[in-house]
Amino acid sequence: MKFLFDLFPVILFVATYVWTDSIYAATAVIIPATIAQVAYVWLRYKKVEKLLLVSMVLIIIMGGLTLFLKDERFIKWKPTALYWLFAVVLALAPVVAKKNLIRAMMEKGFSAPSRIWSHLNTAWVLFFVFMGFLNLYIAQNFSLAFWVQFKLWGLTGFMLAFIAVQVLVLYKYVDESGTKP
């Protein structure tokens, strides 16, 4: 259910584009939808994940530029900006903060060795770099209608497939007792 909630603004974006055939109408919908999503999370849990906040800020900035300048490139670049920001943060966190963020997010219930967490962190960095380039390639070489659909189905599909691989890698390290060794 959380997965659908997280995708709600993107689903509205795609639905609006399909209904109106206007990237500007779709952008005008995703901005308040994302703000409403963050507001709901704040009101319900009194806490908002940094990932969601960063995504909202990028949507407001890139969507605002799209609408203000009447230039669709900005909203098309937003996924790339987000993916590359994630890649930079994941790459720098072990060096700057001495923290593996993938491990911090996923280690509950897994007793994988440090080298596995390090490999997973590197895999996520490379994955986000790839996703950024893939988004740019699709945005620049295919129709706007194709990119809008790819944003929902393609990027989400790649993400789900990559997460499934992560689960398979970590599966043999499941801590059945529920406590960390």
Image (spheres, grey):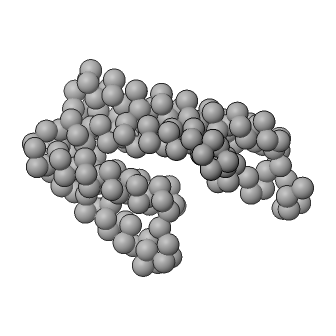
User: Is 140 situated left or right of 21 in this image?
Assistant: right
* Closest to the observer, 180 or 99: 99
Does any portion of residue 158 appear in the rendered image? no
Please report the residue visible at 63 percent of the width from the left and 33 percent of the height from the top: 122
Q: Is residue 126 visible?
A: yes
Q: Position of residue 22 (x, y in %)?
A: 14, 44
Q: Position of residue 46 (x, y in %)?
A: 48, 77
Identify the residue at image location x=70%, y=33%. 119
The residue sitting at the front extreme is: 96
Q: Residue at x 27, y 20 (%)?
A: 141
* Residue located farthest toward the top when viewing the structure as drawn: 141
Instruction: Name the spot of residue 91 as percent of width and height, x first.
Output: 57, 38
Horizontal side of residue 34 vs 181, given as left or right: left
Instruction: Name the side, left or right, on which 128 lies relative to 123.
Output: left
Q: Picture quarter containing residue 138?
A: top left
Q: Residue at x 62, y 32 (%)?
A: 123
| Viewer-proximal residue among 140 and 69 | 69
